[in-house]
Image (tube, rainbow, N blue to C red):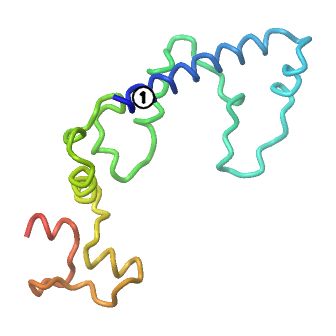
């Protein structure tokens, strides 16, 4: 329940910020207007200033957030159908939820990952498979 509350709080902050920026752009006499319209350039490619986004009037903040989520290039994006819906297993105890997510994302403590993290030298499985991955543990 807490996570849903945080999601809606985030959406409300986006809506308030978007409306504030739109008003600030229209009133030239505000000191903030100059800062927003004549801002310094971003020094890093990862910097994404909020005032560079011109809000689309036809979309709600929730629709815009969902579009951004679905447009992101993420490896395991197929695990989340809707960013506003709770994934299956969300109500499990934390230790089971964590283990489930390790297998969903392929990022658990298997030999292949431990080699990648420089914890052990050999990625082979105890069943004599060449590489022990999270998928191998579940499927083989």
Residue indicated by mark 1: 66
Q: Assign the N terminus to one quadrant of the image.
A: top left
Q: How many other residues sit within 10 Å of disc 1, few (<14), some (14-19) or many (≥20)?
A: some
Quarter residue 24 falls in = top right
Left or right: residue 79 versus residue 43 is left
Quarter residue 102 falls in = bottom left
Name the residue rendered at 79%, 9% in the picture.
26
* Residue 42 drawn at (x, y percent): 76, 45
Q: Considering only vertical position in the picture, is 19 above or below 75?
A: above
* Residue 131 drawn at (x, y percent): 21, 80
Residue nearest the viewer, comparing 25 with 134: 134
Q: Considering only vertical position in the picture, is 78 above or below 85?
A: below
Left or right: residue 116 versus residue 56 is left
* Residue 56 drawn at (x, y percent): 57, 17
Q: Is mark 1 on a helix, strand or loop?
A: helix
Name the residue rendered at 33%, 78% in the picture.
114
Name the residue rendered at 27%, 49% in the picture.
94
Left or right: residue 134 versus residue 31 is left
Q: Considering only vertical position in the picture, is 17 above or below 107?
A: above
Name the residue rendered at 58%, 23% in the picture.
14
Quarter residue 123 falls in = bottom left
Q: Considering only vertical position in the picture, is 105 above or below 123?
A: above
């Amino acid at each position: 329940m807490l996570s849903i509350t945080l999601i809606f709080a985030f959406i409300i902050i986006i809506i308030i910020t978007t409306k504030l920026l739109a008003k600030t752009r229209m009133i030239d006499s505000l000191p903030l207007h100059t800062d927003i319209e004549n801002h310094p350039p971003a020094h890093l490619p990862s910097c994404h200033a909020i005032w560079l986004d011109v809000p689309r009037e036809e979309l709600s903040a929730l629709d815009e957030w969902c579009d951004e989520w679905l447009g992101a290039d993420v490896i395991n994006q197929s695990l989340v159908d809707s960013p506003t819906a709770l994934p299956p297993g969300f109500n499990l105890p934390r230790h089971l939820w964590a283990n489930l997510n390790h297998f969903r994302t392929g990022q658990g403590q298997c030999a292949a990952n431990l080699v990648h993290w420089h914890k052990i030298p050999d990625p082979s499985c105890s069943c004599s498979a060449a590489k022990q991955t999270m998928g191998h543990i579940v499927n083989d």
